[in-house]
Amino acid sequence: MVYSNNWQYISWSTFQPNSNSAINPDHLNYFRFAGQILGLCLYHKQLINVYFTRSFYKHILGIPVNYTDVASIDPDYAKNLQWILDHDIDNLGLDLTFSVETDVFGVMQEVELKPGGSHITVTEENKTEYAQLVTELRMTRAIQPQINSFLSGFHQYIPQSLIQMFDEYELELMMSGIPEIDISDWEKHTEYNGYDRQSPVIKWFWEIVEDFSQENRVLLLQFTTGSSRVPFGGFAKFVGGGGPQHFTIAIVPYKEHTLPTASTCYIVHGKFVGGGGPQHFTIAIVPYKEHTLPTASTCINMLKMPEYKSKTELHNRLMVALQCGNQGYAFA
């Protein structure tokens, strides 16, 4: 159903509509049919073995996309947007306007982000609008006909009102199910930054994860990597910008009431990757302050965790972060 030129293969079992699908004159009918099939599966609670990009789940739910969603299809471009937002650009001579060049069947065409955009300079004052409009162009406008056709079929069985209370992570689990997560494999392929395997916090962490339900394990995986799935080959296949990069737990400063956060990235060919290559799961230490919550950099599969004073405190802080969806984003 999705293994065709109508869909763009983003990563292992992760798809979104192909902006060039119009090469097939019947492409919109295929998208409508795909929507009907997936809507019917969801209606009858039948799971599918297909995953979509986070932004496409947002489109199904009617949730606006934002610039962080660009990382799923073009991480380098997403990094550039992040850099623009993080720096004062008025005196840098970037010469950006509210227009971009897009590749249409091998031909570069200029597309205005707003009326008269080719004559509007991007400044420090309007750069946030620029980032949002670029995101909407690449993630929504470029595939709007395909999205509309898919939804016309999907809504025949699943009205928007039935799913509007869910977020994109919940919809993914509803459609594709909760995967089994092997904790021993996860722990075996985890690295530590500021901690070691014998650190009390690390021992507590794995005891807590071992006691987690599969649902909570998936939430933790989503929180720290941006994905509910383990790559083919297990946790050893985490990859990032410069080569293999395990899941990492890092120590960070402890601050009162701080919750864990995360910054997600993407999966390529069934492997967890960050901004520059293979990235395994990493746990890093951060300074301890009372009530500080764990945070994460999902582009490098890193969980940043304060040195909590007790297992109970670690459990409570972690659950607050997971239940509140306190997920950050960084192009680390």
Image (spheres, helix red, strand yellow):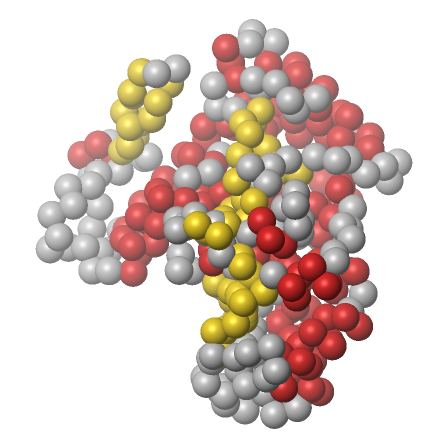
Which residue is pictured at 33% across the width and 26% down the height?
A: 102
Which residue is pictured at 76% across the width and 31% down the height?
A: 38
Frontmost residue, 187 versus 168: 187
Q: Position of residue 167 (x, y in %)?
A: 66, 52
Which residue is pictured at 61% across the width and 9% down the height?
A: 26
Q: Does the rendering let one see residue 168?
A: no
Q: Is residue 313 left or right of residue 39?
A: left
Q: Does the rendering let one see residue 294?
A: yes
Q: Position of residue 284 (x, y in %)?
A: 50, 73
Tell me if residue 245 comes above or below residue 304 in the rendering: above
Tell me if residue 155 comes above or below residue 145 in the rendering: below
Locate the N terminus and report the quarter of the image it occupies. Answer: top right
Which residue is pictured at 24% across the width and 60% down the height?
A: 87
Frontmost residue, 163 versus 318: 318
Q: Position of residue 181 (x, y in %)?
A: 74, 56
Q: Is residue 157 left or right of residue 91?
A: right
Frontmost residue, 28 versus 49: 49
Give the total of numbered labels. 0
Q: Position of residue 272 (x, y in %)?
A: 55, 49
Locate the C terminus and report the quarter of the image it occupies. Answer: bottom left
Q: In which quarter of the view is residue 159 placed?
A: top right
Residue positioned most to the top: 25
Tell me if residue 137 comes above or below residue 91 in the rendering: above
